[in-house]
Amino acid sequence: MSTLNVDKVDPSTGTALEIGTSGDTITVPSGATFNVAGTMQSGGVTVANTPNFWAYNPASQTMTKDTEVAVIMATEAFDSASAYNTSDGKFTVPAGEGGVYWFKGAIRMVGTAAIPTRATTSIWVNGAVSLANELGGTGGLNTYSYVAVYGILNLSASDYVQLYFYHNASSDMSLSQTSSHMGGFQGFKLIG
């Protein structure tokens, strides 16, 4: 093995620099830092956890008892591709961005007069449930019960994803959480 000591390597012509040959292994040793200030790509595709979004603060909406209701988060912390719609609660996979995504949806029942014995938070894709988590108890839940669901989904461009909530309280429930730590809906594309 020989060592080449230089401070910068530029291509002699054009704008592309190739390191190694097909089948070679390029190693960054332990303790070294590989700092990428530009765009990193794999197979011509940019490597990043985008698109991504985080929405919170459910719109003032009624959660009808014994009914799966789509939760519309009205405030965005961020939305890299403008793919989440605060008017209908749908995240729509942008063109060319199909792949594996991670999602989390959470509802915190704060100060509700109607105490359910069962509550479910679920994530739906194209109008059908794909992920769900249920909280229940014979003594009833409390006014600060928190139900979260998370997981990964393999999606195609134009698929849409929504957060839903179900409860079996004796009357309808209102979600009016104004703080981001009281639940929300978020997701991002995994680097493949």
Image: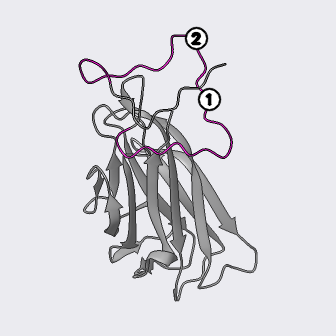
Residue 45 location (% of width, % of height): 37, 29
Residue 24 location (% of width, % of height): 58, 15
The secondary element bearing badge 2 is classed as loop
Which residue is nearer to you in this view: 118 or 21?
21
Which residue is nearer to you in this view: 1 or 124?
1
In the depicted structure, whether residue 90 falls above or below residue 160:
below
Disc 1 to disc 2: CB gap under 8 Å: no
Q: Is residue 42 left or right of residue 134?
A: left
Q: Amino acid at mark 1?
A: Thr
State the image quarter where residue 41 is shown: top left
Q: Is residue 108 left or right of residue 40?
A: right
The stretch drawn in magenta includes residue 33:
yes
In the depicted structure, whether residue 54 falls above or below residue 46:
below
Number of numbered discs? 2
| Residue in the picture at 55% in, 61% down | 121
Residue 37 location (% of width, % of height): 38, 46
Overall secondary structure of the magenta section: loop
Q: Amino acid at mark 2?
A: Gly
Query: Gap in Å between the C-alphas at discs 1 and 2?
Result: 13 Å
In the depicted structure, whether residue 26 falls above or below residue 171:
above
Inspect this view and state whether residue 7 appears: yes
Inspect this view and state whether residue 67 appears: no
| Residue in the picture at 31% in, 36% down | 158
Q: Which residue is mark 2?
A: 23
Q: Which residue is mark 1?
A: 27
- Farthest residue in the top direction? 22
Question: For the residue carrying disc 2, how many other residues have a C-alpha within 10 Å: few (<14), some (14-19), or many (20+)?
Answer: few
Magenta region, residue range: 11-39
State the image quarter where residue 39 is shown: top left
Q: Nearer the viewer, mark 1 or mark 2?
A: 1
